[in-house]
Image (cartoon, rainbow, N blue to C red):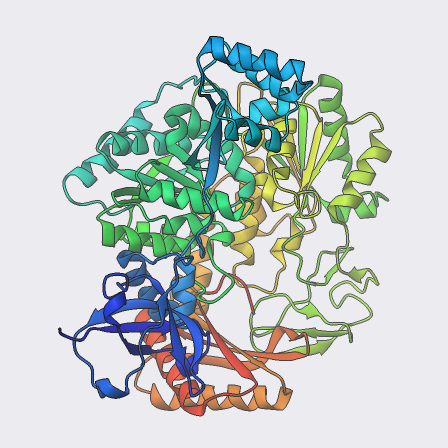
């Protein structure tokens, strides 16, 4: 018999062992060991048992077979990796930088098998008359619990196990005793856990307009003719993008295909799931971090078995192992949450395109405020662009008012609410209409601004805001520039130079003070910790159980509340002045998305944007709902300074136990890139410098950036740096890579 060998990736996330190890496949495991399965293998000098993933099987080896270690066993509890998932994992490792094992675990939505959920039923073993006589005998013996069970089974041949337990107040031991006596039997069957708990299937299908039908038709025509490609749907808020997605997916299902629907936030799951469930029933499922391990496992097994046509969820849903994938939809594709913040730092949009190319599937990207990356590619012809400029029916875009908070301060108003916003809120309360208050809090990064004139302390070299550290030092986390925080504003001399400190709780308290009778719901990290808390809050507000909803970013992403006619943005500047080159883009997106929550039906909507910088182009274009105007200005700026998408950027993070070691390694790595890639024209290396947060858990952090117009050149730089780290066998130090970063390290 020809010897066979397994190529195994060991489950150790360290660069030193980030390679394939070959093991002999014992004869007794020849059938069980195959690509994708988890195995237990002896590893290292001490032959400690380690878990690994088989990525390939071969009949040749360069190592002497008599000295080769053998696979110990197959891990029956471990989830196997599909062939396509292995391909994607290697692509993630190559394109984003990580260990192979980290990439393999990323493509596994579920890591461990779970016990199946058992559905039990109690089946009668006697005739009705015999059961009645047995019940009478139990009564005579004062065995009343047994008698109740047998009496219930006189007219029914079988009953659900839990129904008997709960309604008849019978213990498990009683049922087991009756089974031993031969009166009944308890039958079990495995069933899938289903996290979808929606009873109402009624659907009012809106009539599609001509533009919607055109987009659906063209996407499907491209797919049918073997040109699936990537399609960008740029539609204003409330323009009916979801109906386009539903139409495309419905046709794909009719062709025997499956669909993945990506959404940026768990908070969107309920509303999205409701619309899809009403259209497709229980052929729709969801996967996200709020599900139990058993629920997640069952959804993946249902997908493998072909019991699901549509999987909805955040970026992890991308790796659902569908056999006949037809389309991947990425809703709100501009959202930051589509970028992983752990290694490999992949972007769901790019990964969706890769997965679709492997499966011959289409990709549909949708947003009212497309990312500059997506729109740039659409303009250049790489993606196909569709525009949806109007809301359907009688719905119109809301009227937007911009309030200058500098003027409010001059006139003695120190409240969280401007006079215009307060007036509009009172009006909605009196009319029984709803209000959303959006606090742009999550974007806060310690920027300092003048409350009198709006001046922001910025880096003179990078055009990003300086961050305040505890020692009073203002730092740029792109180039390392530092200066002491001045006592007075350098622009107007005002002493009101400070950060913004309001949070959602303070806003809620202020509402209760100003509007005592108002019913308020708050949606933030604190109120959404429990399972189903998103659905509970959103459904309560949709049912008009509250007048005002207060929240951070999660409340402005894709939600449709017919009763909302007023949206207030309390502090636009918090994202505008992040120490981030994407600050302008993020602010425009947030303000436009927030404005889009108002007036989604026949009732006209209003938006009040409170800001210290009403003249900033992000605020101006958001108030006009003018994406093209914003894009033209922002892309010109990106091209001038060489930021993505015009050029690409690789961020390198060095984490070290000793500060000096991190500084030295950063200098060595930047010198290596400059030396070995000197022939790459246009390559720029910035740094090293202390990271945005210089120290976490007694570990020091340093970063540097590499920029170039060709993405593959940065991949080459990453490969050289990985080889350098591997040869150095770093101790007490780790290195991470992030391509076209969404956030600073």
Q: Residue placed at 38% from the left, 53% from the top?
A: 349
524 vs 563: above or below: below
Q: Position of residue 116 (x, y in %)?
A: 45, 43
Q: Quadrant of the C terminus?
A: bottom right
Using the image as rendered, state which of residue 347 and residue 621 is in the foreground: 347
Q: Position of residue 433 (x, y in %)?
A: 67, 21
672 vs 563: above or below: below
Name the image quarter holding residue 555: top right
Q: Residue placed at 66% from the left, 23% from the top?
A: 169
Q: Quadrant of the N terminus?
A: bottom left
Using the rendered image of the protein, determine whether residue 398 is visible from the camera's viewpoint. no
544 vs 461: above or below: above
In the rendered structure, the answer to whether residue 522 lies left or right of residue 605 reads: right
Name the image quarter holding residue 234: top left
Badge count: 0
Using the image as rendered, state which of residue 362 and residue 489 is in the foreground: 362
Name the image quarter holding residue 98: bottom left
Q: Residue placed at 78% from the left, 61% from the top?
A: 498
Q: Residue placed at 15% from the left, 44% from the top?
A: 226
Using the image as rendered, state which of residue 419 and residue 560 is in the foreground: 560
633 vs 672: above or below: above
In the rendered structure, the answer to whether residue 40 lies left or right of residue 357 reads: right
In the rendered structure, the answer to whether residue 223 lies left or right of residue 338 reads: left
Q: Position of residue 14 (x, y in %)?
A: 46, 78
Q: Position of residue 352 (x, y in %)?
A: 34, 52
Using the rendered image of the protein, determine whether residue 28 is visible from the camera's viewpoint. yes
């Amino acid at each position: 018999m020809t010897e066979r060998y397994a190529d195994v990736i060991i489950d150790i996330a360290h660069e030193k062992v980030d390679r394939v190890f070959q093991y002999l496949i014992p004869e007794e495991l020849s059938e069980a060991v195959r690509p994708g399965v988890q195995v237990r293998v002896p590893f290292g000098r001490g032959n400690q048992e380690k878990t690994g993933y088989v990525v390939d099987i071969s009949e040749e080896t360069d190592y002497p077979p008599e000295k080769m270690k053998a696979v110990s066993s197959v891990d029956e509890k471990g989830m196997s990796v599909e062939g396509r998932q292995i391909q994607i994992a290697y692509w993630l490792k190559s394109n984003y930088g990580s260990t192979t094992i980290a990439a393999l675990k990323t493509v596994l939505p579920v890591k461990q098998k779970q016990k199946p959920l058992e559905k039990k039923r109690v089946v009668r073993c006697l005739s009705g008359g015999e059961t009645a006589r047995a019940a009478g005998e139990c009564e005579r013996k004062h065995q009343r619990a047994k008698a109740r069970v047998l009496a219930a089974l006189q007219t029914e041949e079988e009953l659900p196990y839990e129904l008997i337990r709960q309604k008849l107040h019978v213990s498990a031991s009683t049922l087991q005793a009756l089974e031993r006596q031969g009166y009944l039997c308890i039958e079990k069957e495995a069933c899938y856990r289903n996290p979808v708990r929606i009873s109402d299937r009624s659907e009012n299908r809106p009539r599609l307009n001509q533009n919607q039908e055109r987009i659906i038709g063209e996407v499907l025509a491209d797919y049918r003719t073997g040109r699936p490609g990537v399609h960008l749907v740029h539609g204003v808020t409330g323009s009916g993008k979801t109906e386009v997605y539903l139409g495309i997916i419905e046709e794909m299902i009719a062709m025997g295909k499956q669909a993945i629907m990506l959404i940026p936030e768990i908070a969107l799951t309920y509303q999205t799931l409701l619309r899809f469930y009403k259209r497709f029933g229980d052929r729709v499922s969801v996967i996200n971090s709020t599900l139990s391990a058993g629920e997640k496992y069952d959804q993946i097994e249902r997908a493998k078995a072909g019991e699901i046509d549509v999987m909805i969820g955040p970026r992890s849903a991308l790796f659902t192992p569908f056999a006949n994938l037809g389309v991947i939809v990425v809703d709100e594709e501009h959202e930051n949450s589509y970028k992983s913040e752990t290694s490999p730092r992949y972007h769901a949009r790019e990964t969706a395109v890769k997965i679709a190319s492997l499966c011959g599937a289409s990709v549909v990207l949708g947003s009212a405020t497309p990312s500059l990356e997506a729109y740039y590619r659409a303009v250049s012809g790489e993606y196909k662009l569709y525009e949806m400029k109007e809301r359907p029916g009688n719905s119109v875009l809301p009227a937007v008012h911009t309030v200058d908070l500098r003027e409010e301060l001059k006139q003695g108003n120190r409240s969280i609410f401007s006079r215009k916003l307060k007036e509009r809120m009172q009006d909605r309360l009196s009319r029984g209409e709803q209000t959303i208050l959006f606090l742009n809090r999550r974007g806060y990064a310690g920027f300092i601004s003048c409350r009198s004139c709006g001046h922001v302390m910025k880096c003179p070299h990078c055009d990003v805001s300086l961050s305040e550290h505890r020692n009073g030092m203002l730092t740029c986390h792109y180039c390392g520039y530092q200066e002491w925080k001045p006592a007075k504003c350098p622009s107007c001399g005002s002493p009101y130079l400070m950060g913004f400190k309001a949070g959602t709780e303070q806003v809620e308290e202020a509402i209760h003070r100003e509007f005592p009778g108002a019913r308020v719901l708050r949606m933030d990290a604190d109120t959404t910790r429990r399972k189903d808390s998103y659905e509970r809050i959103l459904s309560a507000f949709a049912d008009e159980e509250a007048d005002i909803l207060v929240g951070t970013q999660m409340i402005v992403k894709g939600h449709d509340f017919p009763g909302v006619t007023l949206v207030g943005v309390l502090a636009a500047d918090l994202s505008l002045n992040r120490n981030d080159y994407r600050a302008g883009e993020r602010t425009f997106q947030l303000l436009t998305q927030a404005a889009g929550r108002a007036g989604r039906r026949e009732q006209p909507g209003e938006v009040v944007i409170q800001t210290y910088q009403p003249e900033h182009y992000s605020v101006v274009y958001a108030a006009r709902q003018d994406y093209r105007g914003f894009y033209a200005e922002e892309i010109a700026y990106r091209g001038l300074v060489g930021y993505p998408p015009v050029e690409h950027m690789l961020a390198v993070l060095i984490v070290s136990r000793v500060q000096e070691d991190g500084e030295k390694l950063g200098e060595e790595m930047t010198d290596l890139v400059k030396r070995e890639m000197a022939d790459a024209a246009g390559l720029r290396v910035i740094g090293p410098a202390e990271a945005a947060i210089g120290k976490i858990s007694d570990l020091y952090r340093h970063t540097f950036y590499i920029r170039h117009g060709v993405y593959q050149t940065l991949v080459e730089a990453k490969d050289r740096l990985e080889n350098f780290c591997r040869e150095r066998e770093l101790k007490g130090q780790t290195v991470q890579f992030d391509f076209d970063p969404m956030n600073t390290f």
